[in-house]
Image (cartoon, helix red, strand yellow):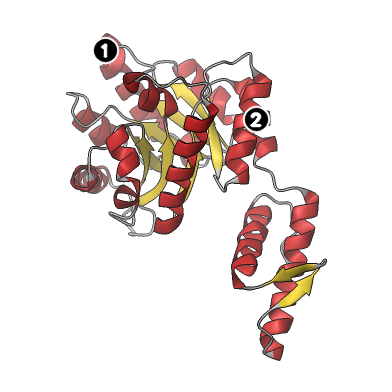
Amino acid sequence: MRSKLFVPGSRPELFDKALLSQADGLSFDLEDAVAAPKKEAARHTLQAWLASTAAIESQKTIIVRVNAMDTPYFSDDIAQVVQPGLNMINLPKPENPAAVLDAIDCIEQAERKNGVNLDGNHPVRLLLNIETTQALRTAYQLACVHPRVAGLQLGLADLFEPIGISRQEQFAIKYAMMQVKLAAAEAGIDAFDGAFADIQNMEGFLAEASFAAQIGFSGKSCIHPSQIPLANQAFRPSDAAIAHAIKVVAAARVAEASGVGAYVVDGKMIDPPFVRSAEALVAVATRMGLIPTP
């Protein structure tokens, strides 16, 4: 998901419109975007939509950000939104690995009750928000607690505001990004950048997304459709990078067959870490349709 568009769960008139956007993923929000008196109605509306043909047949990644586990809304959120059209639950403020396992238990109960994942091959997965100091400190433990955890998502506003760090402080932003990326990488899952609230500041959004892409994040949240093309641009591998990666992968095959450990491609010394990076880039570019499949 290069781009993940937030859609308020209380705005059903936007649901099908969001499907027509260029976002790779849609995150229907039952948390911050829905006021308390409207949460029950939003949950029921979203439940019906997630069971619809439009959601089930969508090629986008469909996510629901539920309310946090310490709220009175969490259990009902999980029980109702785990439907055939759902791919992922976005879990806000996970306190510790045990809490994530409790959330997974709730998801599994809902799957059984609602007839989801009957074949065992399409489980609802988890995207964990890293938006507290404790979650940032224990990000790796959260990331590797269960195979259903598919990614970590950085939430800078929630992380910074309570402790008095400016959302504009570049050192703090990059430090938190690196922490989340390293934790996700060690666990072998994706890292996703969070939202950028200044909708008018397209230059700032693109700069932040571009840095995230440079350090290996997989995509960025969008709170407005105007941000989608910027995210897609930032996380699209360049043609030059794709061409080089294809050369590296091809050269690696020749080197392996010849018993050569290190070799040169385009004037650069190549060894196993570079090969793994090139293979990952080729896989991403192929999924994006930038490299034709044989």
Q: Position of residue 111 (x, y in %)?
A: 27, 46
**What residue is shown at x 43% (from left), y 38% (from top)?**
153
5 over 213 or under it: above or below: above
Q: Amino acid at mark 1?
A: Ala
**What residue is shown at x 29% (from left), y 55% (from top)?**
146
Q: Is residue 119 left or right of residue 180?
A: left
Residue 287 has which mark? none
Q: Is residue 232 left or right of residue 168?
A: right
Res 31 visible: no
Q: For the C terminus, which image quadrant?
A: bottom right
Q: How many discs mark residues in the rendered view?
A: 2
Kindly report which numbered mark, 1 or 2, lies closer to the viewer in this rendering. Answer: 2
Secondary structure of the residue carrying numbered label 1: helix
As drawn, the residue found furthest toward the bottom would be: 258
Q: Which residue is mark 1?
A: 36
Compute the Cα span from label 1 to label 2: 35 Å
Camera-nearest residue between 124 and 260: 260
Q: Which residue is mark 2?
A: 207
Secondary structure of the residue carrying numbered label 2: helix
Camera-nearest residue between 122 and 257: 257
N-terminal of the pair, mark 1 or mark 2, is: 1
Q: Amino acid at mark 2?
A: Ala
169 over 134 or under it: above or below: above
Task: State the image quarter where residue 47 is shown.
Answer: top left
Q: Position of residue 283 (x, y in %)?
A: 63, 59
Q: Position of residue 195 (x, y in %)?
A: 50, 26
Task: State the image quarter where residue 157 is shown.
Answer: top left
**What residue is shown at x 44% (from left), y 15% (from top)?**
11
Res 50 visible: yes
Q: Position of residue 118 (x, y in %)?
A: 31, 55
Task: State the image quarter where residue 235 is shown.
Answer: top right
Camera-nearest residue between 68 and 53: 68
